[in-house]
Image: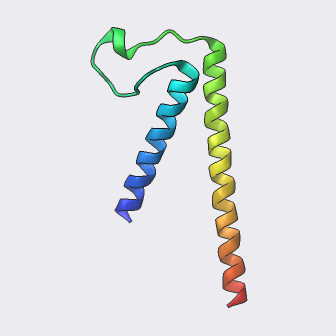
Amino acid sequence: MRKTTTKAAQQLDKLLARIALDHLFIETLATRNSDSLDFHDVSVWGVKSALMAAYQAGLAAGQSTAAKAADQVTQQQAA
């Protein structure tokens, strides 16, 4: 079970890093202990775009989870 949590956390980190790069042009979300590297000026439309991408990813994950749960119920009823 712990391995799944770690894998899920790693997938989430990769997703967030991709959104930060694609929408905010931030190369890494790792703390680098330097103001010039850790603080970024971003546009409001970039923030909006990143928030929309995160929302869409969460919506897709929720729909995927719901579909898997429905499949499990269907399989249990068939058995």
Percent x, y for residue 48? 66, 22
Q: Residue at 65% of width from left, 75% of height from top?
A: 72
Whether 76 is drawn above or below 1: the answer is: below
Can you tell which quarter of the image residue 22 is in? top right
Q: Residue at 35% of width from left, 14% of height from top?
A: 37
Q: Residue at 46% of width from left, 47% of height from top?
A: 11
Q: Residue at 41% of width from left, 56% of height from top?
A: 5
Percent x, y for residue 2? 35, 61
**Which residue is most to the bottom?**
79
Whether 19 is drawn above or below 34: the answer is: below
Whether 14 is drawn above or below 74: the answer is: above
Percent x, y for residue 77? 72, 85
Whether 8 is drawn above or below 66: the answer is: above
Q: Is residue 37 left or right of residue 74?
A: left
Can you tell which quarter of the image residue 45 is in? top right
Identify the image quadrant of the C terminus.
bottom right
Q: Is residue 11 left or right of residue 43?
A: left
